[in-house]
Image (tube, grey):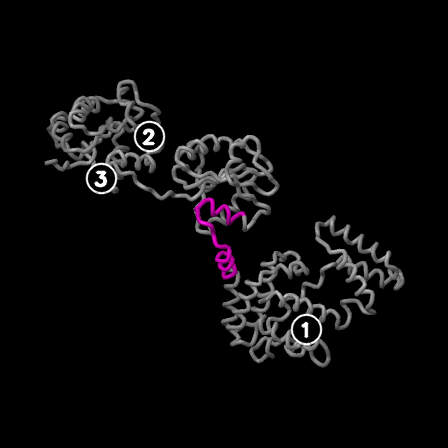
Amino acid sequence: MVRQREFDVFLAHNSQDKPLVRGIANELKQRDIKPWLDEEQIPPGRSFQEVIQQAVPNVSSAAIFIGVAGLGNWQAMELRILISQCVEADIPVIPVLLPGVETIPEPLIFLKQLNWVRFNTEMDDNALDNLEWGITGRKRKRKPKFDVFLAHNSKDKPLVRAIANELKQRDLKPWLDEDQIPPGRSFQEVIQQAVPNVSSAAIFIGVAGLGNWQAMELRILISQCVEADIPVIPVLLPGVETIPEPLIFLKQLNWVRFNTEMDDNALDNLEWGITGRKPDPTSRIEQKYSELSVRLALLLEAGRWREANEETRKIILKVAGQEKEGYLTDEKIQQFPSQFLRHIDILWNGYSSGKFGFNIQKRIMRESKKDPKVFGQRVGWCKEDGWISASQVIYSVDAPEGHLPWGTIETITMDNAGLTAIVDTIRWGTKGLAKQDWQRQLIVDFVDFMNTVTGDKSDKEQMKRNLEYELSHEKAWWEGERLAEIQINKLFSFLINFS
């Protein structure tokens, strides 16, 4: 019958390493491992040899701790008894190198044939896991503290920091140097500790190439990732088209390319590489929309219709990425995500008991056969004496059906601003300047050239039609009722995308 041993591991050590070994013993106890430690087991007046002879048969393994102070007399006495008894009892011996020790010292050269455990820091989780494995024979499956290690050139720090923040919003925990490296610590030392605690590594490559910081990271990072079977994800930042020559070996891996700084598609792919799970863009978008509209929902619930109306306008500009410009172009209207429009509409419709919202306005648009004036009369925006102003909007449930939200598209009438300015100049100078087709074409070509210079996209044929339309009217678009009608037509384009 095999006798159950009382202790899981015998801790042999130099007395100068006592504080650290005591800390390791306490950590092993937290893992339900029972260590034999001299100060807990040897009573006063008993010799080391006598107690050790009694203890070793009661342990399942022995760990020999080797610190920078070398072997003391106490440890030497232990070892003579310990090693001989371990050999006789077929008890595994685990060499443990404490911080600062790189290899087995000469007096213990025979231990080099055994796999050893190395502590890079005093409480090295990876080393503790390996020590537990040697003691129990069971390898602990530890969940890494970080999901991804972010290796990058310091010149790309602002963008990488922003990407790290976005990953945190996705419930991922990135390792970023500025968050983890305390003052006075070398990169190599901290990285050696960090990499065993990450599930993946992302190598960010910007237009500035690889800096010295990244070069130091990479020498350690890549070798450790290969050993630990950790996936490495090359990430090309905006302006980088391919893997540079110094990292040519990474071309065999699928990389992630950011076409813009906060490229949602690239962020989805990066998340996929980190977690192994392909994110659902629809779910992410819905979450993003919910976060954007929290304040709107609170305002609507409180019946604060005026503030809710303004909040709706701000949200639409934010989602379209037009906050700075303050208006939507025709292109932005066509590209506006219909699912977000539905999200806003549900809020307006729900809190107004079905009286307000974009879906109501879309129904009235159809019933009015897209006639701006008929539509305006139905929703209460157009009176006998003309179109209402901001001060005449009724911010109450007593307003006509579809009256709110109002003015959400009022700031989008400045598309083709260059063309408008030119038409204004033509009217102001002479009505006959652009009567010939070649003259109109010349104006259109000039505006198209200016749009190219400023980076704006343009449709030359549409501009030509707009120019002819403008010249066919005696009044400019900002005169009389034309502005209001243009705004309503813009709203119609917006509502058509709503399904």
CA distance separating discs 1 and 3: 78 Å
Query: Is 438 placed above or below 15 here?
Result: below
Around disc 3, counting alpha carbons within 10 Å, would you say few (fewer than 14), some (14 to 19), or many (20 or more)?
Answer: some
Give how far across and how far down residue 428 sits, in percent. Answer: 85, 63
- Depth order, front residue of 392/278: 278
Secondary structure beneath label 3:
loop
| Image coordinates for residue 75, horizontal then vertical, percent | 21, 24
The first of marks 3 and 2 along the sequence is 3
Is 276 a magenta residue? yes
The reply to whether dot 3 and dot 2 touch (C-beta < 8 Å) is no
The secondary element bearing badge 2 is classed as strand
Q: Quadrant of the C terminus?
A: bottom right
Which corner quadrant of the image does residue 55 belong to?
A: top left
| Residue 280 position (above or below residue 374) | above
Q: Is residue 187 visible?
A: no
Determine which residue is flagged by label 3: 33
Q: Which residues are magenta?
A: 266-290
**Kind of element beneath mark 1:** loop
What's the amino acid at mark 2? Answer: Arg
Q: Name the spot of residue 169 as percent of width and height, x first.
A: 47, 52
Does residue 243 appear to the left or right of 469 in the view shown?
A: left
Residue type beneath disc 1: Lys
Most common SS among magenta residues: helix
